[in-house]
Every structure is written in C-alpha cells, then in structure tokens.
C-alpha cells in the first residue's frame, strides 16, 4: 500500500492535471469564469494533524455548494433531526442540482435533500439568529473554529454575482413559499444562501472541515463536542448519497467515502477516523463536479485503501 507524502500527492497532481481539459469552468456565474481551468490542488490532514499538500494550494475559491454541509451541520445542531427533516427530505434526487420540477412532482412539495439548491435554501431559513447578518456570523464563527483560521471571510464580488444571477434560486425559494410546504421568508433565506456560497476557502480550509467531521465533531486535541456525533453520522450519510448530486452513486462506488462538491471545482471529503481531504480543480463536468478532483479521489481511495466498504 502507498503512503501519503507531499511527493506522492505531487505525482498525482501531475498525472491527473491533463484531466482538467475534459471539464469546463462554470460560465454561469461571472465571478467563476475567470478561474483557471488547469488549476488542480489537494490538501490532506491525518489524525496526528500532519498535513500533506500539492498543486494549487494557495488558490482561494468560493465555497459554492460545499456550504450546503455547513448550513446543514448548523441547522441540525440548532433544531435537531426531527425538525430539520420535516422541512427537507433525505432522499437522493438523481437530477441536476438546481432543478425545480422535483418540488412540483413530489406529494409534499418539499426538497428531496439538503444538498440540492432548494434544500439548502430551505435549510438556510431554519438557522437561528435575529437577522441574516447574525445567522451568517454564527456560521462564520463556526467555520473559523473548525478551520482554525480567523481570516476566513466572504468574497463580496462573488456575493454580488450570486445575487445578480440568482433568479433560478429565487424561483426555487418563491415556489417553496407559494406552496407553503416550507415556511420561509424567501429573501432572507436567499440572502444567507448567497452569502455562504461566497465564502472564500483554500484546500487546507476544506481539509480541516473534512477532518473535523472525520473526528466526530471535535477539534483534534480538544474534548469539546462542537457538533453532535449523531448529527455528523447523518450528515455523512447524506453526503454519501447526495453530496455529488446525480453523480453520488458513481462516487460511492468508485471513491467510497463521503464527499461534497461545489461548482467552483472544490470537493471536501471525509474518511472517518483517518483523514480530512480538500481538493480544487475548477474544470467541472456536466453534473457540476471537478473532473481532476474526482479522479484524484478515486486514485487515493484505491492506493491508500480508503473505501469504507473495503474489508482488506
Ligand atoms: N451558487 C451556485 C448556485 O446556487 C452553487 C451551485 C453549486 O455549487 N452546485 O447555483
């Protein structure tokens, strides 16, 4: 079996960089179309807090849909599972991440799960706080703690672009409000959703989030339970079944540990009790997932025997 080292990760980056030409940088959001198609980077942190990195490790990118696991984590901690899953379902969708049709076609008009846009907007309406600003600050403060990075902030130009180009998300929020299936103030829920999509991260920040989940909701060397382990079990199950949208089955089979992607080309991965992993590769496929990033995770899984279903 291979061992993780910076050199090993560097080899993977070199080997899989050509795959970045097989995807495209997201063109829908003006703030993303200036990303570099050939960027590819990875950070991996183990339970001894040893960090391994290679490739575009200084690159800062917006969280986009990776924020959906953060909002779900905070909502579960705020309200508990019963209330959260009265608002959104926990079933995989098998359709594009911002589809509206599933809201109309299912009996209850509720989003299928918290990892698709409608679900994440509904989750944003649940997070506690007297104002959008206060809710956002609660999320930021949680993220700063988890990543051990006081400098985490959001990118205002991404936030403005999310708002400007947000009609599809507005349609989802207003549709849910119109049926009454989700009791939400559409503008407030959207504002929080747009803001958390705009949070800037590096691959190391992503890996720290993965590590926190891999460590059952505690920081390394600290006994304080910041998020309940039970909620993180639920979160990981949902990442496994829906975190990569309608490519989640493929990732479950080929990678075999929970992942969550964003259209900036980022992916956060959790190998329970072993690693937190962050990758960035802005060239994404038609499902919205990083092409090079996905390939690297697949390879890591087999080289390091990380598949949760492996018995060897
Ligand atoms: N900001 C994007 C949206 O709301 C995020 C989508 C994604 O990363 N899949 O559509």
Image (cartoon, rainbow, N blue to C red):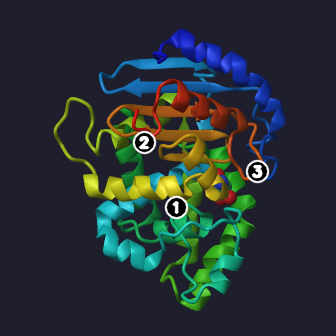
View quadrant of ligand 1: bottom right
Residue 192 - label: 1
Q: Is mark 3 within 8 Å of ligand 1?
A: yes
Quarter holding the C terminus?
top left
Q: Is residue 193 above or below residue 84?
A: above
Determine crowd level at label 3: few under 14, some 14-19, many 20+ residues with C-alpha closer than 10 A: some
Secondary structure of the residue carrying numbered label 2: loop
> Going by the image, does 21 lie left or right of 182?
right
Q: Do the numbered discs 3 and 1 sit on residues whose CB atoms are within 8 Å?
A: no
Earlier residue among tags 3 and 1: 3
Nearer-N-terminus badge (2/3): 3
In the image as oriented, which residue stretches furthest toward the left? 223
* Nearest to viewer (mark 2 / mark 1): 2
Along the line of sight, which residue is nearer the eye, 204 or 158?
Answer: 204
| Mark earlier in primary sequence (2, 1) | 1
Kindly identify which residue carries mark 3: 29
Q: Position of residue 46 (x, y in %)?
A: 37, 25
- SS for callout 3: loop
Q: Look at the numbered disc 1 and give the secondary structure of its residue.
A: helix
Is residue 306 or residue 143 the one in the foreground? 306
Badge 2: how crowded within 10 Å, few (<14), some, or many (20+)? some
Please name the residue that numbered disc 2 is placed on: 308
Residue found 52% across the figure and 51% down from its top: 67
Residue 169 is left or right of residue 128, and the answer is right
């Amino acid at each position: 079996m291979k061992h993780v080292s910076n050199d090993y990760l560097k080899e993977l980056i070199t080997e899989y960089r050509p795959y970045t030409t097989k995807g495209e940088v997201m063109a829908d959001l003006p703030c993303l179309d200036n990303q570099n198609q050939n960027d590819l980077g990875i950070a991996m942190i183990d339970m001894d807090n040893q960090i391994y990195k290679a490739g575009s490790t200084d690159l800062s990118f917006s969280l986009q849909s990776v924020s959906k696991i953060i909002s779900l984590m905070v909502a579960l901690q705020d309200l508990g599972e019963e209330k959260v899953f009265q608002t959104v379902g926990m079933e995989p969708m098998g359709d594009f991440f911002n589809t509206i049709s599933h809201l109309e076609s299912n009996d209850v008009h509720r989003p299928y799960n918290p990892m698709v846009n409608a679900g994440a907007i509904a989750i944003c309406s649940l997070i506690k706080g007297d104002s959008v600003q206060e809710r956002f600050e609660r999320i930021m403060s949680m993220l700063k703690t988890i990543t051990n990075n006081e400098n985490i902030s959001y990118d205002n130009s991404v936030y403005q672009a999310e708002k400007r180009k947000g009609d599809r998300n507005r349609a989802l929020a207003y549709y849910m409000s119109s049926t009454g299936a989700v009791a939400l103030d559409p503008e407030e829920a959207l504002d929080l959703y747009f803001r958390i999509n705009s949070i800037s991260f590096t691959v190391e920040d992503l890996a720290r989030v993965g590590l926190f989940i891999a460590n059952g909701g505690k920081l390394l060397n600290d006994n304080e339970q910041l998020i309940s382990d039970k909620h993180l079990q639920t979160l990981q199950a949902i990442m496994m079944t829906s975190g990569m949208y309608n490519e989640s089955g493929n990732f479950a089979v080929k990678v075999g540990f929970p992942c969550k992607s964003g259209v900036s080309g980022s992916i956060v991965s959790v190998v329970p009790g072993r690693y937190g992993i962050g990758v960035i590769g802005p060239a994404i496929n038609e499902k919205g997932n990083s092409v090079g990033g996905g390939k690297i995770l697949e390879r890591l899984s087999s080289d390091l025997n990380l598949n949760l279903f492996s018995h060897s």
